[in-house]
Image (spheres, helix red, strand yellow):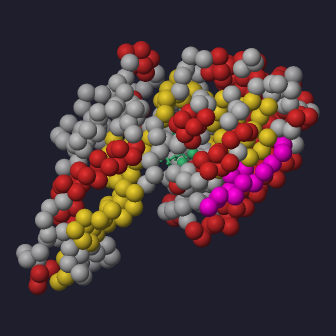
Amino acid sequence: MLDTVLFWIEKNRGRFLHDLKNWLAIPSISAQPDHAADVQQAAEWAADYLRTIGLSVETVPTAKNPCIVATTPATLAPAGSPHILIYGHYDVQPPEPLDLWTSPPFSATVRNDQLFARGASDDKGQAHCHLAALMAWKEINSGFPCRITVLLEGEEEIGSPNLMSVVNARRDLLGSADILLISDTNIFAPGVPSITYGLRGLAGVEFALTGAKTDLHSGMYGGTVANPAHALVEMLARLHDKDGRVTVPGFYDQVLPLTDAERDMWKTLPHDDTAFARDLGVPALFGEAGFSTLERKWARPTLEINGLTSGYQGAGAKTVLPNRASVKITCRLVPNQDGEEITDRLIAHLKSLTPPGVTFDIVYRAKASPPAITPIHSPAMAAAAKAMELAFGKAPVFQREGGSIPVVAWFKQALNIDSILLGFGLPDDRIHAPNEKLDLPYYYNGIKTCAAAYDLLAEALKT
Ligand code: BES
Ligand code: MN
Ligand code: MN
């Protein structure tokens, strides 16, 4: 049966691409309030699509953007079969800066076998691999190889603040899943199919330093009061030591050390520092001393300035002594760091570094996204790897990733469900950046991987 399903997928590539383009046309930008109606529409698009495929679909409202919960009706899945939960997100990052896009971000365009659009890779394109695979099973088999539930959320790019309220409200259904399958990651390199077994977490704050009541003439007042911009950069410069280590006290206390087995496994991956630097256009790599590039991005925590603002930014000169300076900072976390604890430590450290003459204020404190690591030696993982091998003609490697997907750790904590991260993006997909794309051969192989995974996981998870 699987062979026939895979053959049908091959025949229907044009239809899948056409459908995906329609979804990509909806600017479901969760960060921008102006796009609330579009976010809603992208959710409805997915709900209708899943309904057409034959699933029982529910749109679950939240305080902000709805979740779609769609499940195979009893008539379309073998009774007592394992239950696979699929997670994806239909929201996308803002497309700005718009002038750097070669074709408009919400008018998906194919060039050189690559599909260009915001969300092409992160995550509509990858989520659609599952929708297409489900369609194929339904068409060929008039049913699914096991029980399958699809959970799509619209707030992943803003930290999934309302996801767990939906999970709690639908705990009976979602909690009965045997495994959580997610396609929202990259493979290691072109031609190197990969399964991701670890993600970093995220903790973040935005803070401001304030000086006088108002901006001041720098001639009249320069030399008499502290300049918040100077105070800020001085503080920020102290957040790393000369070896690139973060200076927040206790920052590394809970870091799970790398095992020798993992270190050795990563050394076999086809990574080359020179090529990595060249592809990024940087004159040299930079990071914490004593760790390789892959170790730094997958297994070491970091602290980064994401945005920095103070003073006059317009054309020409202005002799002003600004009264405010602010910065957005995030830390990538690794197992077993606790995001809220790290945020507390970071804030305490920042306060202690604040020089006299300015006032420190937290503008925004993000809800932390926990780091995650999933077992690689399990029957489910072996089945997923086999599915990938069937579709790509090559067995996958196992890697971690530096990005964050909050749901992975939350599902483990709340429901004790392990995730399998079966990603089809490429490292150069430019997710979150202008000209995001998805390579179509990886999209089609992704659909096949998903279709095969349902079948092989159904078998592997049988009790
Ligand atoms: N799909 C990404 C996460 C990702 C990217 C995993 C690349 C592996 C490789 C996800 O949509 C994302 O962007 N997550 C945010 C976290 C969120 C809490 C805002 C991130 O990592 O910045
Ligand atoms: Mn994503
Ligand atoms: Mn993203």
Front residue of 74/111: it is 74
Q: Position of residue 14 (x, y in %)?
A: 80, 43
Residue 331: x and y, percent?
36, 45
Which quadrant holds residue 360? bottom left
Residue 108 in view: no
Locate residue 20, reporting x and y percent. Answer: 73, 49
Q: Is residue 444 left or right of residue 12?
A: left
Quarter of the figure that contains the C terminus = top right
Residue at horizontal 88 percent and vertical 35 percent from the top: 74
Number of marks: 0
Q: Which residues are magenta?
A: 55-68
User: Is residue 384 visible from the viewing direction of this image?
Assistant: yes
- In this view, the residue in front, 114 or 119, is 119
Q: Residue at x 40, y 32 (%)?
A: 336
- Residue, x 24% and y 32% (percent of image)? 289
The residue sitting at 52% across, 51% down in the picture is 159
